Image (cartoon, helix red, strand yellow):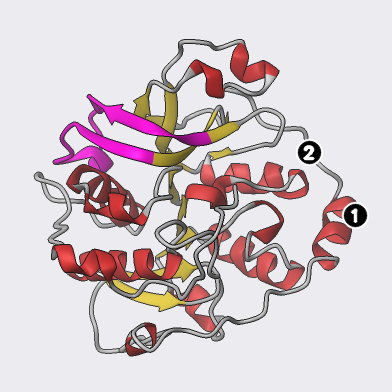
């Protein structure tokens, strides 16, 4: 595992963030509009999990952030948590961040990471400082260099351009360490998903899911120096200042939510960050197959973006 990245000055970070316009809100489909957004019943018991679904991205079947968050919300209810879903990567009612025991970010990364705006970033910082759990999935672990030091301290790892690598291939996960997030997770394969690896890890990170990657995908000097090594794409982290974090770099292809091992690992991780201990058999993740074709973003067919 690699050491922390070099800190970037606050002035440089602020200048970059101020130059980033907030994304325009996209139109939801009729089916997506049936999903209650930013709704929290004060009489509902259980830890609140705020699901931040990113803006529409890539081609149909990839980066289905809204549909993926809707599925996770369904599974969270099966396990005693209280999900609250927000579209376009950020809640209109920012008070939800103060009420969340855990925050899940499932969105594009790099300059498109939805909380880089200084005001939003401060809200996230405040949530982390009070001990809220943090989950970041797929591209969201790709963090601009200006923010990599702090977000890496929150999450336990970040992807950095010029060091990390990404691509699409089958991955097999044959074994898992003993951890609450691996309860009930049996070996599984995720066909042709999109992965990010060779991340920058913090001391104390617990690797949860590791597997072989094609050596031809090692596009950076650092990654090439580790040819043949299994790569960590899922991890847990107990932050020194308090709070738990979980990361998983898969979840590119929406159809792979149909893989029970993947969804149980992710749900276990979310529950763990929210302070819920998964049952001995792992999280309940009952999933009607038809749900995999529901709540998808309205997208035109076209070439996928990286």
Classify 124 as above or below 142: below
Classify mark 1: residues with Cα within 10 Å, few (<14), some (14-19) or many (20+): few
Give residue 221's position: percent from left, percent from top.
69, 17
Can residue 194 be seen here? The reply is yes
Report which quarter residue 219 is drawn in.
top right
Q: Nearer the viewer, residue 103 or 194?
A: 194
**Which residue does the numbered mark 1 point to in the structure image?**
11
> How far separated are the C-alphas under marks 2 and 1?
12 Å
Q: Is residue 292 above or below residue 195?
A: below
Looking at the image, residue 278 sits to the left or right of residue 38; the answer is: left
User: How far from the left and from the top, in percent, is residue 268?
Assistant: 26, 50
Q: Read off the residue under disc 2.
A: 7
Which residue shows up at 61% across the image and 42% down it? 152
**Residue 103: x %, y % from top left:** 45, 63
Q: Where is the N terminus found, in terms of image quarters? A: top right
- Is 225 magenta? The answer is no
Question: Where does the image place residue 96, in percent across and percent down from the top left?
Answer: 48, 79
- State whether residue 157 is above or below residue 129: above
Stretch in magenta = 167-192
Q: Quadrant of residue 177?
A: top left
Q: Nearer the viewer, residue 173 or 85?
A: 173
């Amino acid at each position: 595992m690699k050491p922390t990245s070099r800190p970037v000055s606050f002035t440089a970070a602020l200048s970059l963030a101020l130059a980033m316009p907030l994304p325009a809100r996209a139109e939801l489909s009729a089916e997506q509009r049936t999903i209650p957004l930013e709704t929290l019943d004060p009489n509902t018991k259980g830890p609140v999990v705020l699901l931040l679904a990113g803006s529409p991205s890539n081609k149909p079947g990839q980066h289905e952030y809204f549909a993926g968050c809707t599925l996770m919300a369904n599974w969270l209810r099966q396990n005693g948590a209280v999900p609250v879903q927000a579209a376009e990567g950020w809640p209109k009612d920012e008070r939800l961040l103060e009420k969340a025991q855990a925050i899940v970010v499932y969105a594009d990364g790099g300059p498109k990471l939805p909380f880089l705006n200084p005001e939003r970033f401060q809200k996230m910082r405040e949530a982390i400082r009070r001990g809220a759990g943090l989950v970041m999935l797929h591209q969201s672990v790709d963090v601009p260099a200006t923010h990599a030091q702090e977000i890496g301290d929150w999450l336990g790892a970040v992807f950095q351009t010029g060091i990390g690598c990404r691509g699409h291939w089958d991955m097999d996960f044959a074994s898992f360490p003993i951890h609450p997030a691996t309860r009930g997770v049996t070996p599984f394969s995720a066909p042709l998903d999109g992965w990010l690896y060779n991340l920058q890890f913090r001391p104390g990170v617990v690797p949860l899911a590791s597997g072989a990657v094609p050596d031809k995908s090692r596009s950076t000097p650092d990654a090439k120096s580790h040819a043949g090594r299994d790569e960590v794409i899922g991890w847990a982290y107990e932050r020194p200042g308090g709070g738990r974090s979980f990361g998983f770099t898969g979840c590119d292809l929406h159809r792979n939510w149909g893989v029970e091992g993947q969804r149980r690992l992710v749900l276990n991780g979310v529950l763990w960050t929210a302070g819920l201990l998964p049952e001995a058999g792992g999280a309940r993740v009952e999933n009607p197959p038809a749900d995999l074709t529901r709540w998808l973003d309205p997208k035109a067919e076209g070439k996928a973006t990286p």
